[in-house]
Image (cartoon, grey):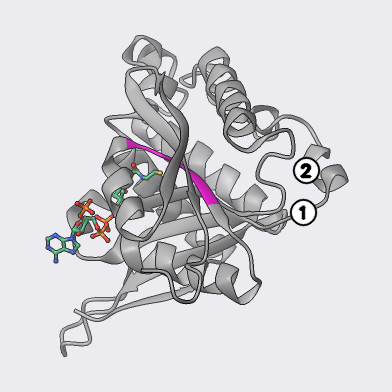
Amino acid sequence: MPLRIRPATEADSFRIGCIGRDAFRDTVSRALFPPELYSKSPTGDPGLDEALWRAARNTRRLKEGKLTYVAIDDPQDGTTAEPEVVGYCQWELPCSEEQSNAGAPEVDRDPTPPTLDRERARAIMEMGERKIKEALGEEGHRDLWYLMILGVDPAHQRRGIGRMLVQHGLNLAREQGKAAFLIATPEGKGLYQSLGFEQVGDAYDVYGTVHCSMLWREPQAGSA
Ligand SMILES: CC(C)(COP(=O)(O)OP(=O)(O)OC[C@H]1O[C@@H](n2cnc3c(N)ncnc32)[C@H](O)[C@@H]1OP(=O)(O)O)[C@@H](O)C(=O)NCCC(=O)NCCS
């Protein structure tokens, strides 16, 4: 079935929230939305709480100008099946020091459901920031294309959708003469390596999932 990419709109946010919830269910979501908080769910469905929180975060990031793309699976096979969003990615573009320090910490920018462990969310964010500086220096990723998040619906993984989304961003970064950066989960690492990313700094544990910083630079002419 044909796959394509288009810029995301706010109308995509709930679907993006659902994909994020499902894609990260065995890694960061398990830490952020621990079972011991399920009984606090205001909707009675902790999975819905998470999707709504992810959707609100996505909408806010869109408004802040984060470059967001969705992958569409468009059956085009004569059936009545509708085109479906099956993956997404979100990039923070190079910015000034003032821009990067503006506003409250990310975790405080969206209303959070009581099923979210705020202390862990804050700890994860702070660890990420620390590791980025360890890997890249005080300037962090300010001069780089930073892949904030990439998620593919588990029912559609291993079809090349993640690759398509990341490659699209790398092409845009290359046009600007910029390098790219991300923090990889074990699931993403092989894909990123095959796209030319290299690990920078040591791997580290985030509530049971090993993460590592990865940097991509445009291959120089003449290099292998
Ligand atoms: C990481 C993730 C985004 C990859 O998405 P994806 O669409 O499955 O990625 P791709 O299909 O492009 O590539 C994934 C692997 O499938 C392989 N693949 C691609 N097309 C394939 C096909 N038709 N058949 C079999 N394998 C295929 C790729 O070679 C790649 O292998 P590798 O990991 O050994 O390099 C997805 O697994 C995901 O959402 N994971 C959970 C969230 C997460 O960890 N996100 C990354 C955060 S940094």
Q: Is residue 152 visible?
A: no
Which label sits on residue 106?
none
Answer whether labels 1 and 2 touch (C-beta < 8 Å).
Answer: yes
The kind of residue on which mark 1 rests is Cys
Chief SS of the magenta region: strand
* Position in image of residue 213 (x %, y %): 48, 37
- Nearest the camera: 122 or 184? 184
Residue 204: image quadrant is top left
| SS category of the residue bearing label 2 | helix
What is the magenta range? 181-185
* N-terminal-most mark, 1 or 2: 1
Q: With 105 as the anchor, is 15 left or right in this view?
A: left
Residue identified by numbered label 1: 95
At horizontal 68% and vertical 39% (from top left) the residue drawn is: 140
At horizontal 39% and vertical 58% (from top left) the residue drawn is: 196
Within 10 Å of disc 1 (Cα), the crowding (few <14, some 14-19, many 20+) is: some
Within 10 Å of disc 2 (Cα), the crowding (few <14, some 14-19, many 20+) is: some
Name the outermost residue toward the right: 98
Residue identified by numbered label 2: 100
